[in-house]
Image (spheres, rainbow, N blue to C red):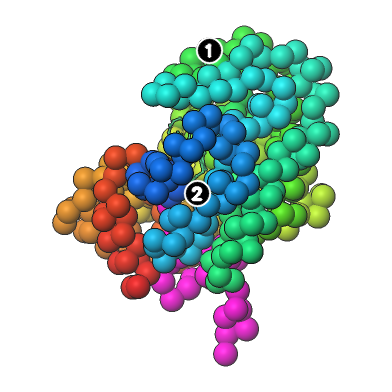
Amino acid sequence: MDPNADTPKLLRTLAGETAERPPIWLMRQAGRYLPEYRALRATTPDFISFCLDPVKAAEATLQPMRRFPLDASIVFADILLIPRALGQEVWFEAGEGPKLGALPEINALTDHIERVAEALSPVGETLSRVRAALEPERTLLGFAGAPWTVLTYMLEGGSSDRTAARTAAYADPERIDALLEVLVEATWRYLAMQVQAGAQALVLFESWAEGLSEEMFQRLVTKPHQKLINRLRQSGVEAPVIGFPRGAGALVEGYAADVAVQGVALDTQASAELGRRIQATGRTIQGALDPLLLRAGGPALMARVETLLEQWGDGPYIFNLGHGVLPDTPVSHVEQVIARVTGK
Ligand code: CP3
């Protein structure tokens, strides 16, 4: 008998085990491609209020779990709840995405750090509700945006090409590093609260790791991730962490070597060899099906699923996308992929 047989597949995989088949979950597995999500979402037009309503957020989290035999559930929330908890105004405009108000002074942001976990306690309540409803073999994931990615939204006032944020990182390094420090301090507290509330593993979304030189990547991505994970471990949080430096390209190998994450999520561009080299260093990998291919469907989709299972499946591997499910993805394509990977 395998002594770890009772440990959920995803947690075993993050511990370095190669399970009988890879566990699967999908980034943005809850959301607009599901008709039941659109119906629920219409009951609370304000997106932030929806995220901070534990009954509705738990329901949105569980919707894909009812439909599909997924191995993990990711709490329904958003990476922009952190700037809001730090005192910056955040709202969503239909069809336009996120908008943020003027960035407060660093001292004003710092004053909020100690109260971030309390301000975001509704996310903790969502996690507790989901954990109570979820079967024990399915893992519950908490998450946060990584400091640099969240800072790009805070500096730019919304979605952008990050030009202003990257320029500021060169032109005003003391201020940018101080802002990253504020985000490290806020984010580890938020993640520790999520673990206390029931999250069993954590995802750190660095959605905008692209376009950085090696030196800037070290400073804006690697260092803040290292600090954040050190702070989590020092505070006694043992939950495994999956880091997702999306767009890091060739720098992802250095990331995997330098940051003490248990899992490294790979984006759509990652080659078979790159993934295998990271597995060989003792890290679990996750990814990297193209969300556009999931949307397109057909034989090309299923052929790519076979390739991914073949190229990475004999090492520690979590099946996932290279980025989030797109809103206009047919549910039947999602169903087909999950059925192939799980055999259910
Ligand atoms: O299943 C899940 O993954 C649900 C939880 C989740 C959401 N956002 C819900 C959401 C997660 C993990 C996120 C992370 C997130 N949010 C990231 C990192 C991952 C990535 O995609 O790169 C980022 C960059 C954001 C910021 C954000 N939130 C943007 C840019 C937008 C607008 C674009 C869009 O997709 O509409 C959001 C809104 C958002 N977050 C929606 C959902 C379901 C859509 C809003 C709606 O339902 O009206």
Q: Pointers 1 and 2 in contact (CB under 8 A)?
A: no
Could you tell me the amino acid type at mark 2?
Ala
Q: Residues within 10 Å of mark 1 (few under 14, many from 20)?
A: few
Residue at 48% from the left image edge and 73% from the top image edge? 19
Quadrant location of the N terminus in the rendered image: bottom right
Give the secondary structure at mark 2: helix
**Magenta: main secondary structure:** loop
Ligand 1 within 8 A of label 2's CB? yes
- Is 294 drawn above or below residue 151 in the view shown? below
- Callout count: 2
Q: Residues within 10 Å of mark 2 (few under 14, many from 20)?
A: many
Apparent side of residue 182 relative to residue 98 in the rendered image (left or right): right
Question: Image quadrant of residue 37?
Answer: top left
Q: Nearer the viewer, mark 1 or mark 2?
A: 2
Counting residues from the start of the chain, the first of labels 1 and 2 encountered is 2
Q: Nearer the viewer, residue 310 or 125?
A: 125
In the rendered image, the residue lying farthest to the front is: 43
User: Taking 99 as reference, is 119 left or right?
Assistant: right
Kindly identify the residue that appears in the image at 71 percent across and 14 percent down: 104
What residue is rendered at 81% in x and 55% in y?
236
Q: CA distance from mark 1 to mark 2?
A: 34 Å
Residue ID for mark 1: 164
Q: Which residues are magenta?
A: 1-26
Which residue is pictured at 31% across the width and 59% down the height?
Answer: 335
Residue 278 vs residue 285, the one in the foreground:
285
- Residue 322 % position (x, y): 39, 45
Measured from the top left, where is residue 107 in percent x and y?
81, 17
User: What residue is shown with label 2?
Assistant: 60
Q: Is residue 228 visible?
A: no
| Residue 221 inside the magenta-drawn segment | no
